[in-house]
Image: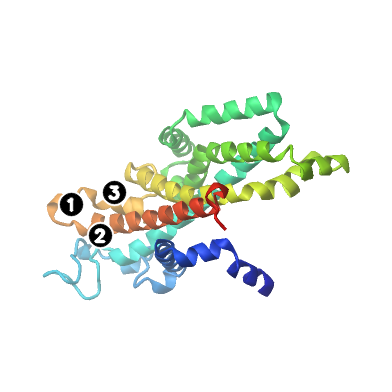
Amino acid sequence: MTPLINRFRESYLFYSFKKDPVAIVSFSVLAFFLLVSILAPVLSPYDPYDAANIDIMNSEIPPVWMEEGEDGFMLGTDIQGRDLLSTMIYGLRVSVLIGCGAVMLQALIGIIVGLVAGYMGGKIDSFLMRMADIQLSFPYLMVAIFISAIFQVAFGIGKYEELAIPLLIIIIGLAEWPMYARTVRASVMGEKNKEYVEAARVIGLKNRIIMVRHILPNTLTSVFVISTIQVANAVMSEAALSFLGLGMPVTKPSLGSLIRSGFEYIFSGSWWITFFPGFLLVVFILVINLLGDWLRDVLNPKLYKG
């Protein structure tokens, strides 16, 4: 482990990171958000899933610094009487889980399709890429409506609310995998005719071994960069679906469902119910995008100056 750490410290990536204040701040804020989401049961003042902590009489209490605020609710409460800070912490946890899960599914499908299409070429390549084109022609909202409607009709709304997180991971993952497939395919086509691949063929290695052990590691840089941006896109997709009523139910807070639950109360004076979750969502997506842009610039060989 120590040689690996020393190698990382001497790398161009770490050197660039130390010299870029935007990357340092973005990484620090992102790490803080991830830590908070992981430690939600410990850091949250209340458990929003525990009915004993919810009192409808406490609904729409303003933040503590306002005239009618209460010390027990720093950022106020939502329309159900839940502590807004607690629901935001748990909502961040759900959004991170859905974002990371969806990206893992996207990457799994996209890498497999891109590897096979780029390496095999010919009719297989044409067929798989046309599948990707067809997938891109369907907006994720249409896919979400289709899958959600079928599931709710088949199993009921109660079951849908219970399985909302894995369903959203599947919906968003199935909608966005062509991004990975196209990127990996382009990388594979640039690698498959190089000498180390030809040498692997000469010694009789099977195609799947050549693809996985030799070509795939050389495509992971682009995959890693895409993944940072795709996490932000997946979180935004979850927020959009939840805002439209196709994502997380109000009883299971996510940043999107919190924004939706308080949106109709903005003009009645309860602005904090939507403002604080919306602000957290914007900052979370911003730091991911800033970090992703920095990674793209640093890991792009054309910009390498070392």
Sequence-wise first label, 2 or 1 = 2
> Which three-letter amino acid code belongs to the residue tagged 1?
Ile
Mark in the foreground, 2 or 1: 1
In x, y percent, where is residue 203?
A: 88, 43
Q: From the viewer's side, name the closer residue of 274 and 284.
A: 284
How many C-alpha atoms fall within 10 Å of the one at disc 3: few (<14), some, or many (≥20)?
many
Q: Secondary structure at mark 3?
A: helix
Q: Which residue is mark 1?
A: 266
Q: CA distance from mark 1 to mark 3?
A: 11 Å
> Which three-letter amino acid code belongs to the residue tagged 3?
Arg
Q: Which residue is mark 3?
A: 260
Q: Is residue 86 left or right of residue 59?
A: right
Q: Which quadrant of the rendered structure holds the N terminus?
A: bottom right
Vertical placement of residue 196 versus 131, above or below: below
> How many marks are shown on the rendered structure?
3
How many C-alpha atoms fall within 10 Å of the one at disc 1: few (<14), some, or many (≥20)?
few
Q: From the viewer's side, name the closer residue of 108 and 26.
A: 26
How many C-alpha atoms fall within 10 Å of the one at disc 2: few (<14), some, or many (≥20)?
many
Is residue 176 visible from the viewing direction of this image?
Answer: yes
Identify the residue shown where x is 37% and y is 64%. 89
Judging from the image, the colouring scheme is rainbow
Identify the residue shown where x is 46% and y is 53%. 292
Identify the residue shown where x is 63% and y is 72%. 6
Q: Which numbered marker is on residue 78? A: 2
Q: CA distance from mark 2 to mark 3?
A: 11 Å
